[in-house]
Amino acid sequence: MEHYIGIDIGSTATKCVAVDRGGNVLAQAVVPSGAGTRADVRAIDLLYGSFAGKREECAGTIATGYGRMLYAGADKQISEITCHAKGLHRILPEVRTIIDVGGQDLKAIIIDEMGMIEQFAMNDKCAAGTGRFLEVMCRVMNIELSEMSEYDSRAREICQISNTCTVFAESEVISKLAQGYAIEDIVAGIYDSIARKISGLVKRVGIRREVALTGGGGLNEGLVRALERHIGVNIQVPPQPQIIGALGAALLAAD
Amino acid sequence: MEKSEIIREMQHAVAHIRETVHEKKQEGKKVIGCAPIFVPEELVIASGAFPVGIWGGQKVSLSGSQEYFPPFACSVVQSITELSMKGTYDDVDAIMLTSLCDTLKCMSQTIQLSAPKLQPIFIKHPQNYRLECAVEYMVKELNRVKEELEEVTGNKITEESLKQAIELCNRDRRALLRFKKLLAEKPGILTNHERHDVIKSRLYMDRERHAQLMEELNEKLEEEPVPAFDGIRLYVCGVMMEPVELLDILDEFGFAIVGDELVQESRQFRYMVPEGLSQVERLARQIQQIRGEAFLYDPKKERDDVIAEECKDVRADAVLFSLMKFCDTDEYDYPWVRDAVQAMGLPILNLEIEQIMQSFEGARTRLQAYAEQIKSRAAARQTS
């Protein structure tokens, strides 16, 4: 079966999608390791184990993400900004503002009705506003990332946490824990902090309705709630926000 | 000389600054450092000394400079401070310093502590530089600088020697302006990295030799046919495009710089020294002509107009605002520039850089996405 592959090699996860010539998704795979860990090889193996396509039937592969230049199997490398725009426009064509919260990157992308990029902004060398921020805070609180949204839903008030720097925020969380604040309220504060950072970047490019959240950050309901409070609009989340970049890459390979 | 030989000589000058300074010292010449942003190199040349650009260093690892500056200070000034502490400027007899931004103001104080052997020569530009009384002030200021240079070099700066230096620098400026125009007419004829080296080499070569090489290079470029070019005609704003890896990334993604208003590049040579009653007055009047300069008091905020006019002249497809991190001067101007450029229907990318940056993946992603954005829009326009 002729197919096309998109592989998004991020900093903390590697995502693969296979599509047919018409852009219909045939298979997908996610490996929770990123660039430089051979996760690309494992993700591709996993992908071929999950559908009937054979490697020799692949008609094109596009790599994207932080590790895109390192993947030897790609015919072409395309930036994750272009791939997220392409992938999300296929799933949610009414969206004009895309917020991509990845492991160590944060991006705000404005697209037009054709799905073409009008503007974008990216965070600098700073973990605040990215998935790394949440991971660090989870480690301090001794909870799993997947548990955060549930804690947030039980919060009674939002504990104020700095959004300037992950390291400063980490020591603030330790201090709040020592003062006896409830973990639920601290989690709400963490979401509020990251949402303030993200909304600052999004406002640089201007918010245009509809708004969607992609990347691993989209898996986090608490983050979606906090972002909606700060941005003031409803945020859509595609069914599998993590694979949007890989889907866009696969669609571009099939174009 | 062949085009490649000319460029190689210029690249050699850019890559071997300390060796050149050492040679000049061996020849018995005095060497005067010329720090950012506008210093009267003509006075240095007229004094018989060798002017050498002091523009920091690419990818310098900062440690000592943090004794004098917080982490949120401009990396150019921080790297100058770091290099001054490491003895990189030990062969330099004096350094001309301005105070045209807050961080340069700080450096005018700290350099006396970070490099006590380095003799500073301060130049304070007038705030209301377009008034006639500013010329009167600047003549006094430049006469003081002239006296200090005469003391350092032991040579008298005469009207005639200064006139010759001004004519030489103007000749070099004319050649550089012609070079810029040729590259806008023939994008792709040189790489962005080569363009940068050719322009930057004026800071590290005998000016006579640079002017001669520029004229020869222009002749060669005029003879060459217009190359096939299907890339993006880019106009660049900001302080500088260093580290040069950024220029290599631009080359990789099909951008050709067709114009710039970079402080380290075009803003150093875009205004000739005009005529005047005396040679010092001519130098004093040069600054009066400057329009839309971020580092001079500009109540009309004309920088965005100047950029828009230049983008139109060079038929730019896109604009890159290379924002030196923590440069509040450029940060203030960016919204005006963005609005003016977007009003022309051109895309603009704000790319935050640091002269000391060592990792380029973030910049690569932004520049690649920018190229993809521009090319896909151009393709869509063609289809429709």
Image (tube, helix red, strand yellow):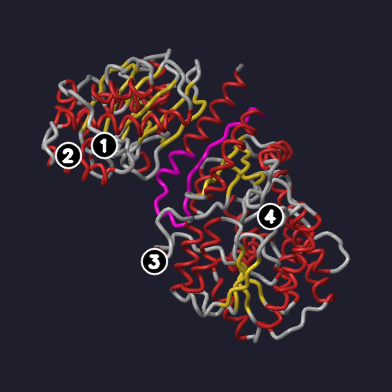
Q: Is residue B356 above or below residue A69?
A: below
Mark 4 — residue? B127
Compute the Cα span from label 4 to label 2: 50 Å
Task: Determine the image quadrant of residue B362.
Answer: top left
The C terminus of chain B lies in which quarter of the figure?
top right
Residue type, label 2:
Lys
Residue type, label 1:
Ile
Residue type, label 4:
Gln
Q: x and y percent of residue B289 in the render?
A: 78, 52
- Eye-nearest disc, 3 or 2: 2
Q: x and y percent of residue B181 in the render?
A: 74, 48
Q: Is residue B188 magenta?
A: no
Query: Which residue range is magenta in the image?
Result: B344-367
Q: Residue at the spot x=49%, y=63% of the render?
A: B57
Residue type, label 3:
Glu
Q: Is residue A229 visible?
A: yes
Mark 3 — residue? B67
Contact (Cβ within 8 Å) of mark 1 with mark 2: yes
Task: Determine the image quadrant of residue B8.
Answer: bottom right
Are discs 1 and 2 both within one chain?
yes
Q: Residue at the spot x=78%, y=64% of the render?
A: B283
Mark 1 — residue? A161
The chain identifier of the residue carrying mark 2 reads: A
Compute the Cα span from label 3 to label 1: 30 Å
For disc 2, the neighbor class at 10 Å (few under 14, some 14 to 19, many from 20) is some
Task: Determine the image quadrant of residue B153.
Answer: bottom right
Contact (Cβ within 8 Å) of mark 1 with mark 4: no
For disc 3, the neighbor class at 10 Å (few under 14, some 14 to 19, many from 20) is few
Q: Is residue B364 magenta?
A: yes
Q: Is residue A40 visible?
A: no
Compute the Cα span from label 3 to label 2: 33 Å
Q: Is residue B382 above or below residue B80?
A: above
